[in-house]
Image: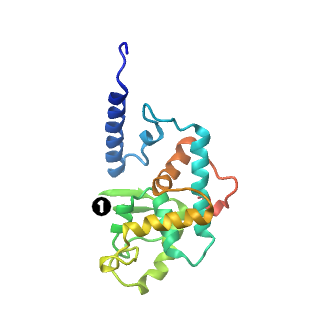
Amino acid sequence: MKGGLRPATVNQRLSALSAFARFLIYRGILSGNPLELISRVGRASRNPAAVKSSWEDVQRVRAQVHSDMLNLRDRAIIELLYAGLTVRELCSLRYDRLWSPDNSRLTVGERVVTLHARACLALAHYLILRPILKGCYLMVGNGAENALKRSSVYSTVRRLARLAGVRVKVKDLRQGRYIAEVLGFSPVFIAAGVAA
């Protein structure tokens, strides 16, 4: 290799830049990690058609969860993940009455996450039900103090993906909104209310 870097060196530097981007996301400076859209050297590159297909699968999962109007918690989970929250952040949210539907921002630790319209609506609907549930966490589950377990979030995403007939993971949901913003995707086959 004349004057070039070894693939391992390039991948290591991409990983370092990705870690820095995650720090900027945590600080609220970036809304998504652009390095997650770059393939590492030696791995199959993600072509635009594959990225769009993955994004469309995410939209199908979102449409699936919105088809059941009574499943308020799962809808809030999916939309908060789509807004960019990590599973750890989602499960650690405490129940308080400080967030209101007219507020499009959610503070998670030191990070401020801007919520899209559908996430605000899903959270507002869930908060109607939340006062009758036990525990001090926003998302109620079977964990200590009625906290939602991380494994429950992963199984919820898997179940909804199976119902929608697609293969979507939590990472795909978390990247979906950012990918749409960066690449300008808009869902043709999904109701506008869900796509917000």
Vertical placement of 24 versus 100: above or below? above
Horizontally, is 115 left or right of 91 in the view?
Answer: right
Q: Residue at x 44, y 64 (%)?
A: 154
In which quadrant will I find the N terminus?
Answer: top left
Q: Position of residue 70 (x, y in %)?
A: 57, 79
- Crowding around mark 1 (Cα neighbors within 10 Å: few <14, some 14 to 19, many 20+) is few
Horizontally, is 151 left or right of 78 in the view?
Answer: left
Q: Position of residue 182 (x, y in %)?
A: 53, 42
Nearest the camera: 96 or 18?
A: 18
Q: Mark 1 — residue?
A: 109
Q: Residue at x 32, y 41 (%)?
A: 20
Type of amino acid at the residue the image marks with label 1: Gly
Horizontally, is 149 left or right of 102 in the view?
Answer: left
Q: Position of residue 30 (x, y in %)?
A: 40, 46
Q: Residue furthest right?
A: 189
Nearest the camera: 194 or 65?
A: 65
In which quadrant will I find the C terminus?
Answer: bottom right
Residue at disc 1, secondary structure: loop
Q: Position of residue 34 (x, y in %)?
A: 44, 40
Vertical placement of 49 versus 137: above or below? above
Q: Is residue 102 visible?
A: no
